[in-house]
Every structure is written in C-alpha cells, then in structure tokens.
Amino acid sequence: MSFQGKAISLSSLENDIYELKFDLQGESVNKFNSLTLTEFAEVVGLLKSKQGVKGLIVTSGKELFIAGADITEFAVLFAGSEEDLKTGNLQMNQVFNDFEDLAFPKVCAINGVALGGGLEMALACEFRVMAATAKVGLPEVKLGINPGFGGTVRLPRVIGADNAIEMVCTGNEYRADKALAYGVVDAVVAPELVRDAALAMLNDAIAGDFDYVARQEEKRSPLKLNDIERMMVFTSAKGVVIPQAGPFPAPKAALKSMEKSANLDREAAIEVEASFFVDLAKTEISSALVQLFLNSQSVEKIAKSYKSSSAPVAKAAVLGAGIMGGGIAYQSAVKGTPVVMKDINDAGIQLGLDEAKNLLAKRVNRGRMSADKMGDVLNNIHPTLNYGNFEEIDIVVEAVVENENVKKAVLAECEQHINKDAVLASNTSTISITRLAEALERPENFCGMHFFNPVHAMPLVEVIRGEKSSEETIARTVAYAVKMGKTPVVVNDCPGFFVNRVLFPYFAGFNLMVAEGADYRQVDKVMEKFGWPMGPAYLLDVVGIDTADHAGSVMANAFPDRLQFESDKQSAVDVMFKAGRFGQKNDKGFYKYELDRRGKSKKVECVDAIELVKSVGGFTKEFEADEVIARVMVPMVNEVMRCMDEGIVATAAEADMALIMGIGFPMFRGGALKYVDSIGAKAFCEMADRFAHLGALYTPTDSLRQMAASGQSFYGAGE
C-alpha cells in the first residue's frame, strides 16, 4: 500500500510500519488547503482498508510541520451558507476522527512549527515528539474563529481544561519546553533526531510499552471533571478570558464551546465546536481579521520584492541622537546592524545612549536578553561627534529637529562625507521629501524614512518616495526597515505623507465636534468602545499637543478647504497648546498624567483641562454615539480615498495595514477601507451626506460614489 499525491505521501517502512508525510508541492510550507484535505481523506480511507498495519508515523518534508489552514481559502469558504459550512466542517472532522480511531498506534514527529490544523493533526495521533526548536499553538481566535478540526475537544482531554483554555483563548504559540510541561507532547529532542525518536516511540507502543488504546479512549470520552470541578474551572477562566478578550468574540466563544462540550463524548463535542466555528466564521470581525492576515501577507510580499533587488545594508548611521535617534540606533543594533550615532554635542549623544540602554535594560529585566547580549548590542552603537568613518556607511537616517532649514543644512553637510552610492533618508513626519532633496547634489539617493514613536514598539515605517528618489534608494531603505524588524509601506510624497495625512482629518472632525459643544471625554469613550486603543483627545496627548499643533498647521496650509479651522475661532488643540499643555511629554494635556503604584504613567481627568476646553464649545451638546463615530471616521476614510486616487498609497492592503500599525486603527475592523466594506460603500456615502453642511471634510470622493453606485467593494472574496 502506498500513495503519492501533490500534498501527501504514504509509504511502507520496515515491520509493517507506514509513514504519512506532508509535503505540499509548489509551496514553502505545508498547510491544510482543499488539496491537502482531499488527499488526507483518501489516505485515511486507504489506512482503514489495509489489514496488518502495525503503526504509523506522521512527518513533514519541509522545515515546518504544518502551518495551519490555508487562510487564502477562508473568504470564499465563509461566504457560503451556514448549513454548507457546518456540513463541510463536520465531514472533514469525521476524517480526523477516522484517522484517530485507526486500530494501531500513531506518532507525530513535529519537526517545526505546528499551528492550528497542524497541531490538531498532531493531537489526532496518540503520541507526539517535538523538536526543541519547534513551536505549537492554536491561533484561530486571532482570526476571529475558534479551532475547527477538533482543537477545543482533543486539547482539553490531552492536557487538562486549565492549560487548554489558556492555549486556545490566547491563541499564543508555545515553545517546546512549555509544550512538554503542559503535556501537549511526550518528548522533546534535537531537530535532527525527531524522526528517529518518533520511530523509537512507535516501536515501543507496538511492543506494548505505551497504551495507545487508552489514549484513544481518553480523547473520545468526556473530560474527567465532576460538576463542581467543572464549574470552578470555567468560572475562574471566565474571570480572565472575558476581560482580556475585550471586543473580540472568538476567545469567549471558544471558552463557551469547551465548557458546553466538557461532559460530552467526542462526536457530540465536535458538533458543539462546529456550531461555534460556523457562527464566528460568519461575523464581520472574522472577515476583518482574515482580511488583515491576508493584507499582512501582501505587504510582506511587496517588501520582499523591494528587498530582493537591493544591495545589503551592512552598516548604518543616525544623525541626531536624542530620544528618537537613540530609539532608531537601538532598533538597528538589536537586530544586528551596527550603527554610528552622530550628534553635535556630548549631551545629545548621552541622551541617545541612555535611551538605548534603558530599552535594553528592560529586555534584560524581563528575561528576554542576557547581560552579555546587552553588552554586545551596545557595542554595535558607535557614538561620534564627527563624520570620521561615514564613508563606510550604506544608509544614513537623519533624525534632527523637525525644521526644514535645519534638516536641509544637516543633510547637505552629511552628503559631503558619505559614499556616492550611500542612501540618505530623513525621519520627518511632515516636511516634503521633494523639497528637502533640493539641498542635495544626489537627490536620487534620498528618500523619507518615517518612524513612529516609540520606535521600538511601533511596527510601521513609512518609506517616502520623493520626485527624484531612485528605485534602488527605495529598495535599500525598505530592506533596512525589514532588517530592523519593521514593516515598511512605500508611499509617495505629499503633505503628511499617508498616515499623518489621514490622521489629521480625524482630528479635524474631533475639533469641529468640540467647537459645537461636545465633551471630549464622551468622544474618547465612544471611540474607545468603537475599538480605538485611545480616543482622539487621549491620542493627541500621546502624539504631543505641540507636535499636533505644528503638523496641523502644515496640513491646514496644504488642504485649507477641509482642514483650515475658522480664523476667528480657537480649536481645542489651540487652547491646549497656548496653555503649555503638551500632553504626556509634560504630564498635562486633555488629561493629566500621574505615576501609578507600578511606576507607569496613567491618565486622570483634569479640572483645568476641562475648563479650558469648555471655553471652546462649552460642552453644550451631547452627541449620539453613532454621530460621534461618523463625525471622526468619515473625514479619515475620505482622506484615505483621496490618497488612493492620487497614488499616494498603492493598494487597499497597504493603506489598511499602515493605519493599523501606525496609529492603532481597530484591528478587528481590518482598517479604514475594510470598515467601508463592512457597512457598504453606499451606506458610507449616505452617512457622509448627513454632514454635507459641514463642508469638504465630509464630501465623499467621486471614486467612492462610483463604487457605491456599482456595488463594488475594496476586497472581493479571497482578495
């Protein structure tokens, strides 16, 4: 008996032992796509019909074991009817059950990452051997669904309810030592020994040293918990899972699924899991999270295409130390690229080094880095007051004060000391890259590289193409961002670039509401409930009121038709700035900031701020939540559409990912354009038209109206 498919092979070994190998042709990883699932069902049928099989090992022909389901197929699959989706899920689960019930022992050799369906495949075996370098997990809740191939059924019966609830409801990945401690696997060995160890364990099971029948029966039976134990386990779990889940329904549903099926046998428990899986798969949140995953893959693919055409970055430099420069230097050094950090005085150098030291010390204190490694990283940061060895540098990131004349002078000076092929990049948040390039002899070697604060925590880097930036310059800058562990999105030059350009209309909508009498605290609460990590007033405090005032002026001058505040009135940001309330940086803005018992900054309502903002609009009107959402979201979406129309950002995927990574757009809404898809372009335009009297800020673009008229969306099924 043998089988050779395009995803799976089945071959005979010695002593009536067989090997089932996953090796999906044409792909770098194994995944449960429709092809793999079809072949798996065929192989299980062969194994059921074959007499005399003594045992089976399950292996992978790739570095990973199985990465999970093929998420690119989800959109089409989930678009079907609930009945069809549940029927198909139960049919596939029957294949996993048939595999599990085969009358001989099965050992899974987890040589690499086994996630989602990959771990569920392993759980259908009686025994599991894991490479010390591998990871396992059930990350489905991060896609807005619960496991669908028996994960909520088998895992609690294998490792106990407590640990299973943690693994399923967090969606985290687990290293080999934790997987062994939890009982997910039976042995951990060196990667090169995984297959041999699995064969040895299989032979021991065949010899009767391990009771595979008892293991099968345990997975077919209800959990071994009495009524009181079951109540205690799930009641205490709810106290942890529900607050942590927030607006995400999947962790709560997965917990409820496990609770409801705890005293059921396998078949009935699988039915429960399937019902929850289908309910979640049909939600807008799941649709958004699946699209978010696909978008992240698309953005990563675009970055790789740039990186593949770039010369490598072996050594970098930062101009201007301080907090931002120190953060950039830290990020470069910690990811393995030596970096020269230049400033004009020792105080600036010290500030930059202190920033890097503080970030490294936190990693050491949390056990994420050894003291020796910290020393190695610091040795990769070379402080200097001159351009002595800049001819060795591949890329220079300028991070001096946000002043056009100063930046031009610094960039022009630096250009005289670097190799003619080196790239110069400016970490500016508002100043035109094309204008900055006017000061340079080689403008083709110059572009923008906009980091978000704090550098170490924010994943996005905007790479800004000026009018004369060469493709090699863009490619090298993208490659450096990737090497730094960041996600680059390439945008074209315009005021505010992409992220800030679409953020300030959001702030403008907020300012208009406050001027009309809104209480900023109510606006914050509504938008936080909508899903933002912080409302607009709180976000302004984090950005910095002084920064927002400066950038807001730049944006208002660039787009006066929609961002120029009435000249005879003050905005909420104006009064904060004039009062010297700059937000978190000086502990007072729309809120005041105090240290809690753990020494972390927390926001507190402030009477002085309330009175100041009352002078703008008087807190005379309470807005309905739907109107608050529309008043800030419509301006943002409209500006995203303008950027798409103008080619500032190339694709919907890049636009949505930039907003999620750069300013914390609610993940479970998938980004601004996915948000439009969720309500429909027609409904969005109707919502915007309710505020047409407020002017251009609320006027949908012609392209969006055309989409509304034709029933188009930004993301078709599976896109």
Image (cartoon, grey):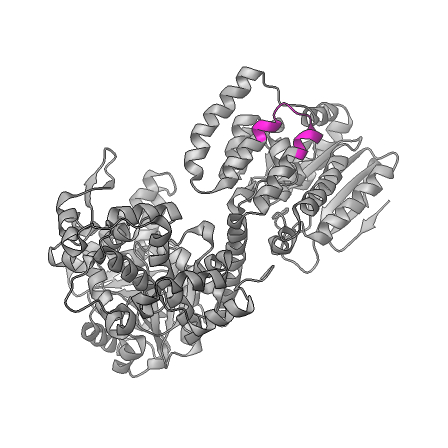
- Residue 146, placed above or below residue 495: above
Q: What is the span of residues highlighted in magenta in the rendered image? A: 258-271
As drawn, the residue found furthest toward the bottom would be 441
- Quarter of the rendering occupied by the N terminus: top right
- Does the stretch in magenta take in 265? yes
Residue in the foreground of this view, choosing between 295 and 344: 295
Q: Is residue 34 left or right of residue 346?
A: right
| Residue at screen point 15% across, 48% down | 609
- Residue 215, placed above or below residue 250: above
- The majority secondary structure of the magenta stretch comes to helix
Give coordinates of residue 112: x percent, y percent.
60, 45
- Residue 541, placed above or below residue 440: above
- Does the stretch in magenta take in 388? no
Residue in the foreground of this view, choosing between 417 and 508: 508
- Quarter of the rendering occupied by the C terminus: bottom right
| Residue at screen point 65% across, 23% down | 222
Give coordinates of residue 367: x percent, y percent.
37, 38
Residue in the foreground of this view, choosing between 341 and 179: 179
> Hey, which quadrant is residue 202 in on the image?
top right
Give coordinates of residue 271: x percent, y percent.
67, 34
Q: Is residue 185 visible?
A: no
- Residue 176, placed above or below residue 712: above
Q: Is residue 143 visible?
A: yes
